[in-house]
Amino acid sequence: MAMKAAHGLASMVLIWVALMAAPAMATVVATQSGRVQGASADGVLAYKGLPYAAPPVGELRWRAPRAPEPWTGVRRADAYGPACMQTPGAAAREGAGDVGPLSEDCLSLNLWTPAADAGKRPVLVWIHGGGLVLGAGSQSAYDGAPLARRGVVVVTLNYRLGALGFFDHPAFDAGQTRGPVNFGLLDQIAALRWVRDNVAAFGGDPGNVTVLGESAGGMSVLALFASPQARGLFHQGIAQSAPGVPSATRERAREVSANIATAVGLDGARATAAQLRALPAQRLFGLQGQGLSLAPGFVIGDAALPQTILSAFEQRRQARVPLILGNNSDEATVAASFGVDPAKVVQRLGAARIFVKALYPGVSDPAQQGREAVRDLVFTAFARRIAMLHAPVAPTWRYYFSHVQTDLQPQPPGVAHGGEIVYALGTGEVCGCLPVPMSAADRAVSTAMSGYWLAFARNGVPAVAGVPAWPRDTAASPQVLEFAAAPVLRPRFMGARLGTMIVALKNIGRYLDRK
């Protein structure tokens, strides 16, 4: 009898421990599609896997996103939805971590808030990177809880990737009219519309939304600035490490899409819409060979992106709202993902290598010259060029992130592509994604950087007490805030070098336009 009593008591203790360890259920919130209930932990309410569009499957594959079907009752929102289809394991191989289960039914978002009340808090919408071919809003580095604890609402989202996200086959033309092609960008716009229509119920302010992202996510931010369909859906933007890579023309997109159809056993450009939509989604990923991908750029010529990002800024057709943009000190780490060896880039210049040596007088190693040249051509000069074009129409700030984790051994030559994310989002101590734990110095850099980001989200100006003032970047007075061991202002940072590169990039652009 005593044994049974002891066993019963032990079971009760185990149940109590399990209940205490499980997150409490959060407030039920009514969205336009139905009621949802998330989870509450450590002062933050988290609502995960919220559908912002109908599943893009069957007849909805390669169509603009549709509104989600409404539901009755209360929908559980305490677990992430599946990531959008991508090559299995690709994100982990690129060092971005596991994205979890994959599905074509993936158009969901995640939201963290201090309280589901009438608080009208600033809203930050994070767009993940991954070259438009991999990644998810559920990756641990993007956890919205740390920033939400500081009084804002954070949203992360999934969007269609690869051939499901960017595809232009003649089978989908409506008569003489070409349809959309940037389905992944249309998904991002649909998510922003969902935020506009629903975030007030979660304690957010639909009139104060900041879009931010890194790499392809940073490029997406600039594409949203350039997109007429995104106008009015956001009020500030932060583009982290947005690459200045070429976009594809509709003709190139047609060619690649026909190649993909051929690669999966269909009759290329003559494949029918029914045949293409009947393909198992996984058949479209992991294809090997030339001319089978549009990554890492968007496609130009549909309603979402009628012109290149650069030309939209040049013609002052972009959203006229405040913008922060910048990059890291060793961005060339991403080059290998696209089969580019920075050292060989310099070697292939032949006699023209003398110009690279002149731009980097203190660097003798060809490999390091290549890394720095790729970084500046693709990222630093592009950020400067966009800033110069945007500053006349809206407040603009530029940064450069060079702080390497203090306990990382051996110390790398700089901060790799994506290395700043956990500092900006304050997730370095919770993501489990760093090679070594953060030191006190690392935490101080994160507090400073995320503080600037939060101030910008609140007021449209990155002004924070106790840290250096961050002046606006203009053509007449170039200003860069460097995130080193402490934030430090760098007026005219890389001025002559970037000026030379911008001229070179303009000439390259004119040459390509004539081809």
Image (tube, rainbow, N blue to C red):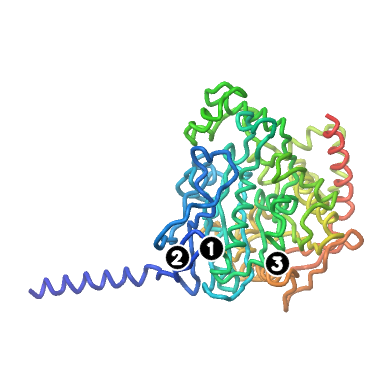
Q: Is residue 456 visible?
A: yes
**x then y, percent, for residue 247:** 73, 40
In the rendered view, tell whether residue 348 sits above or below residue 387.
above
Residue 111: give its label: 1
**Mark 2 Cα within 10 Å, few/some/many (few <14, many 20+)?**
many
Q: Which residue is mark 2?
A: 38
Q: Quadrant of the N terminus?
A: bottom left
Mark number for residue 148? none
The image shows residue 44 at horizontal and vertical percentages of: 50, 71
Can residue 413 be spotted in the picture? no
Give the mark nearer the N terminus: 3 vs 2: 2
Q: Secondary structure at mark 1?
A: strand
Residue holding disc 3: 485
Q: Alpha-carbon distance for marks 2 and 1?
A: 9 Å
Taking 357 as reference, is 459 above or below it? below
Give me the residue at 90% from left, 52% from top: 496
